[in-house]
Amino acid sequence: MDTLIELENISQRYEVGDREVTVLDNINLTVKEGEFVGILGPSGSGKSTLLRIMAGLVKPTAGIVRYRGQPLTGVNPGIGFVFQTFALFPWLTVLENVELGLKQKGLDPAERRQRALAAIDVVGLDGFENAYPKELSGGMRQRVGFGRALAVEPDILLMDEPFSALDVLTAENLRRDFLELWLEKKLPTKAVILVTHGIEELVYMADRAVVLSGHPAHIVADVNINLPHWRDKEDPGFMTQVDALYRILTKKEPATVTAGPRIAPLDDKKFALVPAVRAGAMTGLIELLEDAGGRADLYRLADNLILDVEDFLPIVQAVELLGFAHVDAGDIELTATGNAFAQASVLERKDIFRKQVLKRVPAMQRIIHVIATKSNKQLPREFLLDILERQFGPKEATRQLETLIDWGRYAEVLGYDEYTHNLFLEEFSLDEAAR
Ligand code: ADP
Ligand code: MG
């Protein structure tokens, strides 16, 4: 089969303020005709960036993208792009919205119309050609988006979480309809690349799974999914495959990030990223685990909670970081500390949580020690934010600080004054700092 797209040693860095953040690190990927590839990875791991690089919308900092053997110089002529939600023009009909995708193709109006009508037919919107977006349901609007991407008859269809903005049933329908078109070769497309954070969605649809992970993100797995279509979610083979991917995603990687310029004693060492999860979410998971007898299959648990991996994984990581549970071979098990926590009263829980945070979260220890050195035992939030921003960029820095404040408040080591925007120490941390 012909090679359609090739990524060779692709790296992507962004400038955030006065420092550079590496998002993608040395990505190598080849996609051939006939392939349906799923790309899986946590939020912020660079999945959208990777698709945009393949589309030629973003020029990578390093590396080469080839389409049919030719290095890309601008927008990739062979792709169609499906987004999570489409900006449909409200004043244009379905037909006109789909035709819009063909404007740059230099087709004559009759051919353009004919292609648009064919695409509308394929995505099941026959009869709605003259409807306006506001007359359509969310699922139908998304179908218009698929139609717009397919009308150009792209070699490769790039899809960025195309089902994630839809309600469960609509998403299920659209997945099934799309897969049917693909399997029955009714699409004018030779390969599909689907970005998703749903493992089940990937195993249901794709024949190959590429997993992105780490900071910066790199490919940690590239495996075939050798199950015949149509796949059944209750089938043991299906579950084994989902479990295997779950395991890859939950495997720990050292979460260190290169430090920015030295600016303050607090910045001496690198801050390790903490999972951005509220203390309450951890408590919830620990209680659930206790109910389940102290041990559960991670994927089953997420499934029972109807949670996406993207939402669930950070909670698992946080609980592990604090030593409340241990993940092993796709199972999560409460530790003795986790058990004690589950059975403790509200106040005892705060004690246990405090001990764990102070013992296991270096960022918290350092924040406390810095505040303790100040005579008024207070520190402006902005000060910490600045330091974190140098390391993580503005968005992640805010998430990190909010998470640390939330944990600190729950543990009653840190207080935060919403009025002065100062962080201050609670009694317990003064003791801690004095030791
Ligand atoms: P994903 O799609 O996996 O959630 P993205 O590719 O959207 O991840 O983003 C990966 C990282 O790159 C994020 O931390 C994001 O903030 C950062 N990023 C994306 N685009 C830009 C940009 N144009 N400038 C700076 N940072 C960016
Ligand atoms: Mg994205």
Image (cartoon, grey):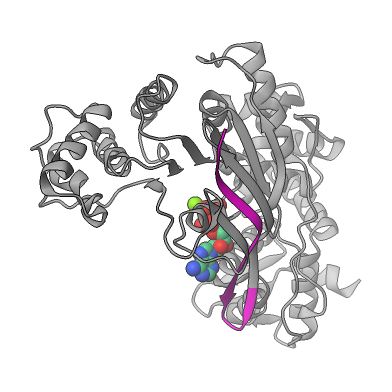
Write down the quadrant of residue 123 in the picture.
Answer: top left
Q: Residue 290 location in percent, x, y?
A: 72, 27
In the image, 311: left or right of 259?
A: left
Q: Is residue 391 above or below residue 238?
A: below
The rendered magenta stretch, by its main secondary structure, is classed as strand
Question: Residue drawn at (50%, 40%), measured in percent from left and top?
Answer: 193
Towards the viewer: 60 or 327: 60
Looking at the rendered structure, the number of numbered marks drawn on it comes to 0
Please say whether residue 83 is visible from this viewpoint: no
Extent of the magenta region: 1-20
Foreground pick, 274 / 127: 127
Residue found at the far top of this picture: 235
Quarter the C terminus occupies: bottom right
As rendered, which of 123 and 139 lies closer to the eye?
Answer: 123
Say left or right for 203 vs 58. Answer: right
- Could you tell me which residue is drawn at 16 percent across and 37 percent down? 114
How far across and how far down the image is residue 93, in percent? 11, 44
| Direction from residue 297 to residue 77 in the image, left or right | left
Q: Verify whether residue 100 appears in magenta.
A: no
Tell me if residue 370 can be seen.
yes
Find residue 71 and report its horizontal and vertical position in percent: 55, 59
| Vertical position of residue 340 compared to residue 53: above or below | above
Q: Position of residue 337 (x, y in %)?
A: 84, 40
Please name whichever residue, 148 or 244, is drawn nearer the observer in this view of the structure.
Answer: 148
